Amino acid sequence: MLGGAGFLWLGWTGFNGGSPFAANEVATLAIVNTHLCTATSLLVWVSLDMIVYKKSSVIGAVQGMITGLVCITPGAGLVVPWAAVFIGALSGSVPWYTMMVLHRKSAFFQSVDDTLGVFHTHAVAGLLGGFLSGLFAKPTLLTLMYGPDNYYGPGFFYSLTDGKFIDGLRQMGYQLVGAAFITVWNAVMTSIICIFISRIVNLRMNEDDLEIGDDAAHGEEAYALWGDGEKSMPTSLRLHISPRIPYFCRGQMQV
């Protein structure tokens, strides 16, 4: 898991840094902001675990890392570093609250199979990132990214000081409309895909097989080591020493 998380973080550097399709100031800033936001998000998530549950976890650290990566992606090259840190603080706390508190209290969430917490790490963090990008997008960075004739309004935070309050408010509206469209699109298309797959195979194992686990699904158990729970080697697997082997060698071959 940690190996995969490390590769994911490394790959996300190219994912965000390559968005401008050029080695320029925006690409450099996107890489820096990606690391700042992700590191902050991880630290906040682990800190909340320590404060509330008195113990941090590797899984919690990875979840905090993922929420940071997801949240900074919409505005990685469009916000300044201090804003990336602020976004990281929110991406490590808001999804933490929805996953660790609301999820456990909600009957709806309890009835949904979401073992990896994808709703919280991607849906919540993604919506949060889109909203915060509209809030903190800097006008000069928007110009560098999209050119001088771009029609994107300034981030709402900057519109308060630039005298473009209406433009900033309009851009926030665009962010919310975009988030609503993506939500509906994902719900509809995912449902269609699941309906199609359900005509071929079951989408969910029955309860008895779920209780058994890997052995029911694959005919074998993951990470099952030989001899687990056994006090001695089965007789049929013992090494039989031939009487023709010299006596002084037999002691070296006892198992």
Image: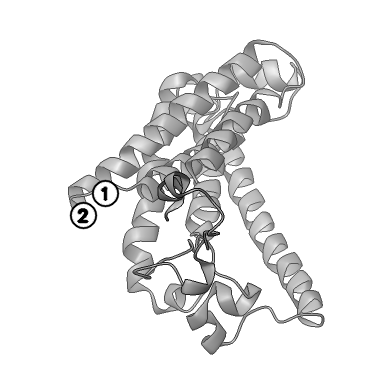
Mark 2: give few (<14), some (14-19) or many (20+) Cα within 10 Å: few
**For the point 51% across and 24% down, which residue is it?**
33
Where is 15 relative to 236, above or below? above
Dots 2, 1 in contact, CB < 8 A: yes
Q: Amino acid at mark 2?
A: Tyr
Q: CA distance from mark 2 to mark 1?
A: 5 Å
- Location of residue 196 in the rendering, given as x and y in whole percent from the top left corner: 81, 76
Where is 20 relative to 59, above or below? above
**For the point 43% across and 44% down, which residue is it?**
248
Determine the secondary structure under disc 2.
Answer: helix
Is 23 in front, or is 183? 23
Q: Which residue in the structure is indicated by mark 1?
A: 49
- What is the number of the mark on residue 139? none
**Is any part of residue 153 visible from this angle?**
no
- Location of residue 186 in the rendering, given as x and y in whole percent from the top left corner: 69, 61
**Residue 52 located left or right of residue 18:** left
Where is 152 relative to 147, above or below? below
Q: Which residue in the structure is indicated by mark 2?
A: 53
> Can you say which quadrant of the picture contains the C terminus?
bottom left
**For the point 59% across and 24% down, which residue is it?**
78
Q: Quarter of the image holding residue 172?
A: top right
Q: Quarter of the image holding residue 27?
A: top right
Is 185 in front, or is 139? 185
**Residue 87 located left or right of residue 243:** left
Q: Amino acid at mark 1?
A: Asp
